Each structure stands twice: as structure tokens, then as C-alpha cells.
Amino acid sequence: MKFGLQVSSFTFPGGARELAGHLERIVRTADEVGFDSIWVMDHLFQIRGVGRPEEPMLEGWTALGFIAAHTKRARIGLMVGGIHYRHPGIWVKAATTLDVLSGGRAWLGLGAAWNQEESEGLGFDFPPLGVRFEMLEETLQIAHAMFEGDLGSQRALHGRLYRPTRLLNSPQSISRPRVPIMIGGGGEQKTLRLVAQYGDATNVFGGPEKIHHKWQVLKAHCEAVGRPYDDIERSTLQGNLRVSRDGTGGTETPARIIDRYGELADAGAQHILFSVADVWRTDTLELLGSTLLPQMRDS
């Protein structure tokens, strides 16, 4: 079992001037106590369910570069990249750059995106869903080609949306055969089919029954395309943890969380990602590092 920390809020004490110091302490602590991965969202406004749009939000790739500089072992990535934000070649070059500069620790997280508000607010296109899925599939095809061999593919690709003529990728990624690709979302007809064809990991949401069902659908897609189901890492993004030793004040104890996450493991989860309330209080991460992480791995 693997565990990932998603830093989903940057509303820390002290405002913008203190933000970098808090983030450095958070990711360094998460890395040291044993989290397998660290993630930030690929959003430009804060999202509903976490806070108001006006709350602080960092651009994802830039934040990951900062995180890479202050960690040593955890893999790092976007949970997950909004496909319309960047051209396919830029997606791959950014992921490769992060991988090289972090010593081979990058993820390339991609999804069809959903937040129309921030696109319209900042003045860039938000294509219809069907077009975004076309963008996603062609980007995945380009990514595979750019990660080929020592310096990427010399062949041209002729998609409907993108027609690159030389998929050069120099320097090539340290992670081989490519920076692992995580595809977010649980759409049963399109998203999970793309995972089966192109992904190294899937990320779905929900409780044990829901995620187990999604992965059975993924398994069927794998069989249809001739892909070994076990080649794909099964991850799930869960909610915001409120944890304390005694479970008071609306929090959960580590033991209670271990029980809940054990049910996810029984449903097939191999990598559980979550946020932590008031994560700038890094003693909570230390508590999880001494309880949840080792006990779940040993069970």
C-alpha cells in the first residue's frame, strides 16, 4: 500500500509572504515521515468543496518545481493536469523536466478537466467535453511517442487536433520507460478505456464498492485491448482528513482511519491519496507517519 499527500489549500497563516516557508515545511515533513507521493491540484482558482475562488492557489508545475527542491524521495505530480491548459508537447517537456531535476520522481497526471469558471475568468478556451477527450487521447499518444528511446520519436503523428512533425525529447526522462502516466477520472466508456490503452495508473473517487466497480470496468477494458490489468496501479483520491490522537473535536483517530482505509485496500486500492486539514500544522503529518503509514503497510 502506498500513500500520497495532496496539498489542496494554500491558505496558511501569514499570507503570501509566509506561504513558501509553510509549503517547504509541509513537503519536507511529508517526505521524511514516509509519504510515497506528494501532489498539488492543477487549478488556477481554488475549487468548490475546498474554499472560495479568491483563496490562494499556486500554479501547479511551478509549485512542483519548488517541491522537488525541498524533497528527496517522494514522487511528485499534478492531481491531475487539466488537458486544455497546455499543448501536448509542453505537457511532456514539463513532466520530463520535473523528472530530470527531481532525480526520476515525477508523475504525469492528466484528465479531461472540468472547471469552466477559471478558464472563462482568465480568458482562455474551455472546449466542449468531447473535444477535451480528443485532446486527452491525442496528448497521451504524443506522450508515449516522446518518451520512446533515447530522445523521443522521429516520426510525425497526424491526429485531428495535433500534427507534430518531430517529437524530440532531450534530455529524456530518467523514469523509464517513461514518466508514469496517471489518468484521473472514473468515466466508464472513455476515461477508463484510455487508462487501459495508455495509462500507468488510474485514479478514481468514492467508497469501497464504487472504486471496486470502476476497477472491474477497467479490467474489462484491459482485456479488450490486450493489456495486463496488473500493469496499472490502482489509486484513489479520498477526502480531507481531520485527525488527532484522541479523536476529539470532530477529528478521527489514526485507528479509525486505518479501518476505513483497510476497506479501500480490500476493494483493490494500491495507492491512497488524501489531504490533511490544517496541514501547515505538520505535527499531524508526523502523527500519520508514525501510525497510519507503517501500520497499513504492514497489514
Image (spheres, rainbow, N blue to C red):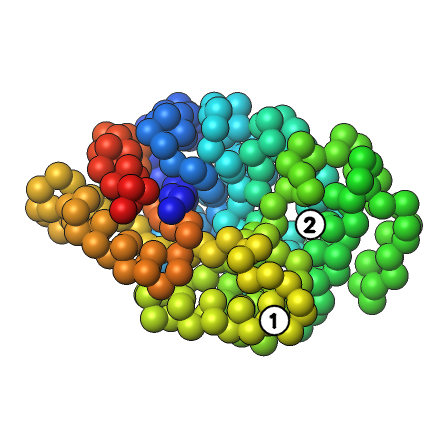
Residue 265 % position (x, y) = 34, 56
Indicate the quadrant where residue 290 lies: top left
Residue for badge 2 = 86
Mark 2 or mark 1, earlier in chain: 2
Residue assigned mark 1: 223
Q: Callout 2, which amino acid? A: Arg
Secondary element type, mark 2? loop
Q: Is residue 26 visible?
A: no
Which residue shows up at 77% across the image and 53% down it?
Answer: 142
Spot occupied by residue 204 in the image (x, y as percentages of width and height) = 45, 62
Residue 41's place in the image compared with 268, above or below, is: above
Q: Nearer the viewer, mark 2 or mark 1?
A: 1
Disc 1 marks a residue whose amino acid type is Glu
Question: In the picture provided, is 267 more to the left or to the right than 242?
Answer: right
Secondary structure at badge 1 equals helix
Q: Residue furthest bottom?
A: 189
Q: Residue at x 23, y 49 (%)?
A: 258
Crowding near pointer 2: few (<14 within 10 Å), some, many (20+)? few
Residue drawn 86% across the image and 57% down it: 157
Question: What residue is rendered at 51% in x and 37% in y?
Answer: 76
